[in-house]
Image (tube, helix red, strand yellow):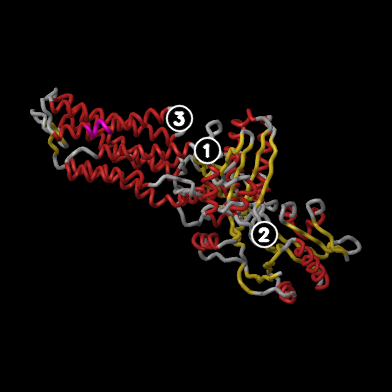
Amino acid sequence: MSFNAHFLTNMEVYLASLLLMLGVFVMSIRTTRREDTKSMIYITMVILIIIQAAAGMIQGFTGEFHGPKILMILMDLVLELALDLQILFILLYVMYEIFENKDYIMRRIKIYAIPLYILVAATFVNLFTGWIWYYDEDLNYHENDIYYVYVLLRYFYVLVAVILYLRYHKQKKNTNRFRIWFFALPMVIGCLVEIFSGYLVFMLGVAISYAVLYMIHATDKSYIDQETGLYSPYFLTQLYGFVEGGAYRLSSVLTFDISDEHDARAFSDIIRMVLPDECDTIRTRPGRFITVSESSDAGYLFMTIEDVEMLTKEAGIKVKIDTAVRRIKEPPEDFFIDKIGYAR
Amino acid sequence: MTIIDVTKDNASDFEGVLGVDLISDLSRNFYRGMASVDDDNVCNGAFVYELLGVDSRKENTSVIRHFTAESDEIKSQLMDKYENNIKEEYVKKSFYETAEADTAAFYESRGFSKEEGESSELAITVADLELLPFNRQARMPEYIKSLHDVSVLQYRTFLKKLLIKEIRGAVEDLAYLPQNWFDREASSCSVSDNKLDGIFLVRKTPSGELRPQLYTAFGPDYLKILGRMLIRTVNYVIENYPPYTKVVISRHSKEVMALTQRLLDGYKGTPCFTGNRDE
């Protein structure tokens, strides 16, 4: 029995994508919290690639061995629907990277998703009409001209995601490690290779993009204290880099020392309620939390201390609070080393 | 004649001179007052100023809110006391605004500049709000709420965000005022992900005036939020306050100036004298 080179290459691409995404899925699922919406979106993206790769392989074998036509059509349906969902979730993921505001994203996505609803409806209508694509009796795949409108609409969504990112990403704090080109480059390369070679490499490009994202997530997770969800001491090195480079003008440090380390989780919940996103809190020791800010406004410090004292008293948590404010002419990096106790 | 400090403890004794609104303001963190009293303890002069920039890294400045006296001698004594006080407060610059020509002349004699113009405060009525050039029937999304509908903690966390960004509006002591210092039903806010991302604070003063104090929003939708909060507050005020109720807008920044020019084109502040002095 011999297989054509085209079939073999496509199967290799599908298999590589499937195995890569299965590995990423297994490693991600253990450390993903359900309440972390962005991570759940990412996991869904990975699962969709797994589904697409599996469907692609089944379809490939069905075509090569002249299997039932209905199976070809079914797998095609799965592929197209998975791709439509894939695009929606890519857009969602990028929106979460930029806005981090679930309510706003949900309001927007209802409008952005309208063309996708039409795509999905068209996919089902095609099952009965074959007006976009169809299989002949020899299981040869045919596309009608309207298929290219279909494809363009999908690329349009990816373009929307990139434009949104380029328009709004500067508003994000410098601690954000997401870079659109990590995400887009392997996909773009895969797309171009597929167009010019005819091999179905685009899926592998997407899988590589997701694997790169996984590595970024894994690195970011090392900066997070698993018990409290606040920053871990490893974050201090990165933060010092930002301070030394001038990207972060450290101006004030609040130090919270809780007397019972078992209260750490409850205390971290209080900190999250009380502090706005403009502050970062690092758990430097089991019972010590340091909140850093680029502001030394006395009103902000006063309100924070007042709220923490009130809420910890209600929760029965004993905490000692110290405040340090950088003098105007003091270099931020010296202040950082002095007040946080950081050793280079 | 004696110059005494006017604080929240004795401010009510000077209601006849200062008015109920300034009496209320004298209980605030950055307001300072002094009065001249004669041998019969009758007030014959009063001076009230507000410190700005104290909590931030900006230079401390002072805005004189009230200055009245029966004679030039009393004016001089009050000004001398003021100058001593602001030395201790590290004030770098003083500002004044007055409708009285003789008071302006006195300021000028003490080294202040003097310019004629219009007041930074724009006074309109609730009836004027009905003529604002926007659609007051616009659909109100559910995330636009009154201040009464959000928790004190949500409100305070948002204030901290504003203070970090050095946004205070017309309220220098935003961090120290309780939520109910503002009209909690007339004031509007926008809530997203259980946090505030926009606020429009309005104060109802003891004399019954309405004073917008802070108007800001964040996020990609901030323009829509600002518009909706304005509509909600305007509608609430029109429905709940008599049409002759005074609304006083402090045009303390370029942004507020631009907004009032756009919405209240043709309305002007009262003629007055303004000036400043480096300390």
Q: Dot 1, crowdedness within 10 Å: few (<14), some or many (≥20)?
A: few
Identify the residue at the far right of this view.
Answer: B39
- Do the CB atoms of the residues marked 3 and 2 lie less than 8 Å apart? no
Which amino acid, mark 2?
A: Leu
Q: Name the residue that disc number 3 marks.
A: A31
Q: Secondary structure at mark 3?
A: loop
Q: Quadrant of residue A92?
A: top left
Q: Position of residue A50 (x, y in %)?
A: 30, 30
**Chain of residue at mark 3:** A
Q: Nearer the viewer, mark 3 or mark 1?
A: 3
Q: Name the residue that disc number 1 marks.
A: B194
Q: Secondary structure at mark 2?
A: strand
Kindly tell me whether residue A143 is visible in this rendering. yes
Q: Residue at x 18, y 39 (%)?
A: A199
Which amino acid, mark 3?
A: Thr
Q: Name the residue that disc number 2 marks.
A: B52
Q: Residue at x 49, y 61 (%)?
A: B262
Distance from the alpha carbon under mark 1 to that under mark 2: 32 Å
Please say whether residue B193 is one of the residues in the magenta stretch.
no
The magenta stretch spans which residues?
A12-16
Q: Nearer the viewer, mark 3 or mark 2?
A: 3
Q: Residue at x 54, y 55 (%)?
A: B129
Q: Magenta residues: mostly which secondary structure?
A: helix
